[in-house]
Amino acid sequence: METQDIKKAGLKVTLPRIRILQILENSKQRHMSAEDVYKALIEADEDVGLATIYRVLTQFEAAGLVVRHNFEEGHSVFELAEGEHHDHMICLETGKIIEFHDEEIERRQREIAKTNGYDLEEHSLVLYVKPRKK
Amino acid sequence: METQDIKKAGLKVTLPRIRILQILENSKQRHMSAEDVYKALIEADEDVGLATIYRVLTQFEAAGLVVRHNFEEGHSVFELAEGEHHDHMICLETGKIIEFHDEEIERRQREIAKTNGYDLEEHSLVLYVKPRKK
DNA sequence: ATGCCTGCAAAGCTTTTGCAGATGC
DNA sequence: GCATCTGCAAAAGCTTTGCAGGCAT
């Protein structure tokens, strides 16, 4: 239930926050920009300011409720932080986003960091692909 | 020689373009924002407009002379496209950028794309790390 | 000479911030 | 009741664009 998540984040349970969380949960797109969320709210006849959406999404990110990605320059997209960590594959022709997780790559990344005297804190991996021609 | 590279890109060999290429070649930092290049030119007493730097860097990117990265949201950084493809590791404490190349990860990425019915066109991999505590 | 380039200033976008009023607890 | 939150409008960054003059070939 959204209310619990918001409370756990140390934030007051307000209508805008509930609505934003619901949009992220129920939208067909898993990855939405602030503008996307804004439009979805308008369509649902909910009146939430764009500035609020930015503020709330940033708070949700800090609380670990959502993850922010910068797939392309110019704007961020947000996705609900549920389930396992995963990386993304973006089709250059259709724009479709596919999520995947590969333990071999994860392990290798940790090894590479270690080899250089570092600990891996996080990473960002995006594969840009095109439909395979047979 | 810079002149050749610019010519090969189908661009006129102008002073601003030569200067920008030289900055990228000779600066201590391999990764520079448009603003960084601008400041470096000012310091070198070269008078080049910021708009020109953006235009030229974009042209150089299209020509494959430089690579654009979006390590952090808000602004791009550019690096000279010389030598092999490589990925980046960024230290969260010092901001240091380390380049690396790992064939195992490269291979696995191609496999993952293939498994999903795609061909890998390009990818972006950034590891965020912290100095290893013993 | 002509078409590509450049600088400047203005505009465009996404995101952030100041502030006064509204709301949750 | 009080602190937090929100909407609005303005501001802030980075980047792009229009335009008139300048430069390379």
Image (spheres, coloured by chain):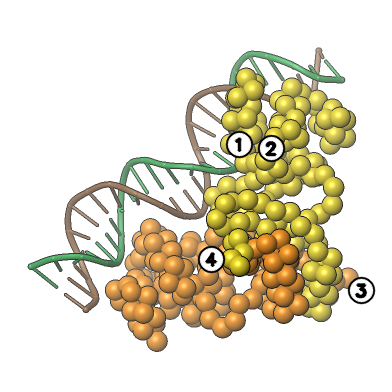
Chain colours: A orange, B yellow, C brown, D green
| Mark-to-mark CA distance, 4 and 3 | 35 Å
Chain letter for mark 4, please.
A
The residue that label 3 is drawn on is A134
Cα separation, mark 1 vs mark 4, equals 26 Å
Q: Amino acid at mark 1?
A: Asp
Category of crowding for the residue at label 4, using alpha-carbon neighbours closer than 10 angstroms: few (below 14), some (14–19), many (at least 20):
many
Q: Residues within 10 Å of mark 1 (few under 14, many from 20)?
A: some
Between discs 4 and 3, the one toward the N terminus? 4
Q: Are marks 1 and 2 on the same chain?
A: yes
Picture quadrant where residue A120 is located: bottom right
Residue B112 is tagged as none
Residue lying farthest to the right in this orientation: A134
Side of B102 relative to A79 (left or right): right
Q: Alpha carbon of mark 4 to alpha carbon of mark 2: how far?
A: 31 Å
Q: Are marks 4 and 2 in contact (CB under 8 Å)?
A: no
Find disc 2 in the rendering and name its residue: B28
Q: Mark 4 falls on what kind of element?
A: strand
Q: Which residue is mark 4?
A: A68
Residue indicated by mark 1:
B36
Horizontal and vertical percent position of residue D14:
55, 43
Quadrant occupied by the C terminus of chain B: bottom right
Query: Where does residue B133 sit, x and y in percent of width and height?
Result: 59, 66
- Give the image quarter of residue B28: top right
